[in-house]
Image: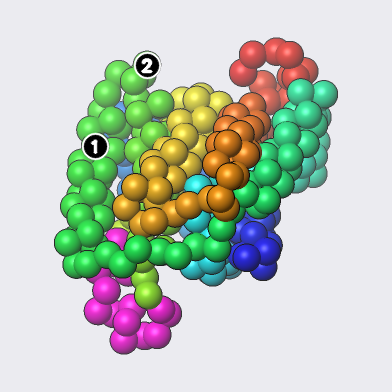
Amino acid sequence: MWWGLLCALGAACAYGVASVMQAVAARAADNGEDGDGVDPRLLVRVLGQWRFVVGVGLDVLGFVAQIAALHVLPLFVVQAALAASLAVTAVAARVLGIRLGVREWTAVGLVCAGLALLGTSAESEGSDPVGLGFRFGLVGAVVVLGIGGFAAGKAGRRVRTPALGLVAGLCFGVVAIAGRVIPSLAPLDLLTDPATYTVVVAGPMAMLFYATALQRGSVTTSTAMMVLGETVFPSLVGIFALGDRTRPGFAVVAVAGFVLAVAAALALARFGEPAPAGSEADTPAHTPS
């Protein structure tokens, strides 16, 4: 079980460092336009930046580690650990000259404490079997989220950013659920399992919607909603549909650890896309984003 937690933390580290590199690439690829809607060409522009490509490579490594963790640990543990990637991003952002205040360092410590509680309370994953109906349900969820994401891109400014962040988080959550139900990584199993195609479609959709939210609105709002979507939704699915459970008598510890880790990650939401030194993100910790 503990090696699964190490895989989850490794995935968080990979995702956190990737976020910093992709943030730098996204700024370099910004063409100065502020149009409405979700523009798939945004992904094409950022893929022309080598830092973004390296970040995607780290994302792939992180995803492999995430899949390994999902086959050992409950979803609520793995997804809370992935939310801790914001703590990694916050620390890595020092490379860009961004200061961390007392609040940020405290949040990083609380994320670690929450994950320690989750690791103590988790029982090795014993997934309930799911059939084709559940897998095709995930495909349907991707279709609904795709429609919702493009509709959110056309919404007013007050609704657009949180809605896109939430849809992106839900897409990441669907990726985690699909990765959990994939029985093996054998090529034939992957090619014949609808969950594989769910991952292939939902992953890029999540990246597109999240990048659009960051480009068009508040980093803090976008990232906070994304974290909520990618942690709460799959955790509930894991508990009610996939048989996730805690060690006997440790349910309260698990809830406390999950809430602590996610709440502390939300406090670090402004590091979802670090800004250069001297910009708004470089303000003291007590200044609202």
Helix, strand or loop: magenta stretch: helix
Residue 67, above or below 140: below
Three-letter amino acid code at disc 1? Gly
- Residue under label 2: 158
For mark 1, does the 10 Å Cα neighbourhood hold few (<14), some (14 to 19), or many (20 or more) residues?
Answer: some
Q: How many marks?
A: 2
Residue 287: quarter of image: top right
Front tag of 1 and 2: 1
Residue 8: quarter of image: bottom right
Q: Write the residue at 40% across / 26% down.
A: 162
Quadrant in the picture for the N terminus: bottom right
Three-letter amino acid code at disc 2? Arg
Q: Could you say where residue 253 lies in the image, as x and y percent from the top left? A: 62, 39
Residue 159: quarter of image: top left
Magenta range is 184-199
First along the sequence among labels 1 and 2: 1
Name the element at disc 1.
Answer: helix
